[in-house]
Amino acid sequence: MASTKRSKAAAKRRGPGTRPVKGPIVPEFRILERAACERVLSRNHVGRLAFALHDRVDIEPLHYVLVDGWLYGRTSLGSKLTALAHNHWVAFEVDEVDDVFDWRSVVVHGGWYTKETAAVAGTASWDRALKGLQRLVSGTLGKEDPVPFRWILFRIELAEVTGREAISRPAEPTATVRRARVKKRRA
């Protein structure tokens, strides 16, 4: 009983989506193709925006939707917009973590544009993006908006998209381990 309580407590400390590695494993790291990266982006809706002004880099979590090859979201007035007015190049990262060696990570580099600063062309994309954001958060930009202070729509160009993944596989037993298993079975 005490062992079970310790196991549950350890799992709680490790956080959701993680479990202890059991037995020898061999992690395999791979580069994700663009299509796989876009699937990760479309499955998820929260990522981290990295932006810089002078010698300071900041990272903020934001929710988003992927529409027509762009990331769309909304934000509020603040230091982020001040920084992005001086340098509109950003990085945006999205992760899926199933375990210590079972994860996918996608990084997007591109320009940040608000609806006010974007080119007039693409109005239909902004409309589709708003519908996507409203499916994600009911009431978005309406009377029932849970975060009405986030009224500034933005989009991020997917100029450069890179991704990596880790997959864990059981390690092949060494010759010594195989011989020990055979001896144990014979005994």
Image: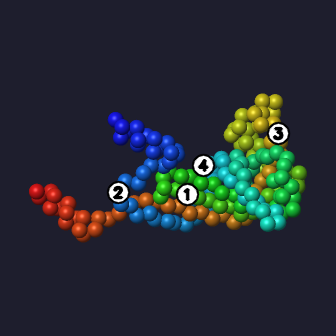
Residue under the point 38% across and 61% down = 25
Task: Report if residue 75 is visible in the image.
Answer: yes
Q: Identify the residue at the far left of this view.
A: 187
- Residue type at tag 4: Arg
- Residue type at tag 2: Gly
In terms of depth relative to the viewer, which is nearer, 39 or 146?
Answer: 146
Task: Give the x, y percent position of residue 82.
Answer: 86, 55
- Residue type at tag 3: Phe
Alpha carbon separation for disc pair 2 and 4: 31 Å
On the rendered image, what quadrant is the C terminus found in? bottom left
Q: Which mark is residue 104?
A: 1
**Quarter of image, res 94:** bottom right
**Residues at circles 3 and 1 in contact by the CB criterion of under 8 Å:** no
Q: Identify the residue at the far bottom of this view.
A: 175
N-terminal-most mark, 2 or 3: 2
On the rendered image, what quadrant is the N terminus found in? top left
N-terminal-most mark, 1 or 2: 2
Q: Determine whether the residue tagged by mark 4 lies in a helix, strand or loop.
A: helix
According to the picture, the residue beneath numbered tag 2 turns out to be 23
According to the picture, the residue beneath numbered tag 3 turns out to be 149
Task: Give the x, y percent position of residue 4.
Answer: 37, 39
Residue under the point 32% across and 65% down = 172
Q: Determine whether the residue tagged by mark 2 lies in a helix, strand or loop.
A: loop
N-terminal-most mark, 1 or 4: 4
Number of the front mark, 2 or 4 = 2
Number of the front mark, 3 or 1 = 3
Number of the front mark, 1 or 2 = 2
Task: Give the x, y percent position of residue 60.
Answer: 72, 52
Alpha carbon separation for disc pair 1 and 4: 12 Å
Q: Identify the residue at the far front of this view.
A: 2
Number of the front mark, 1 or 4 = 1
Residue under the point 78% across and 46% down = 74
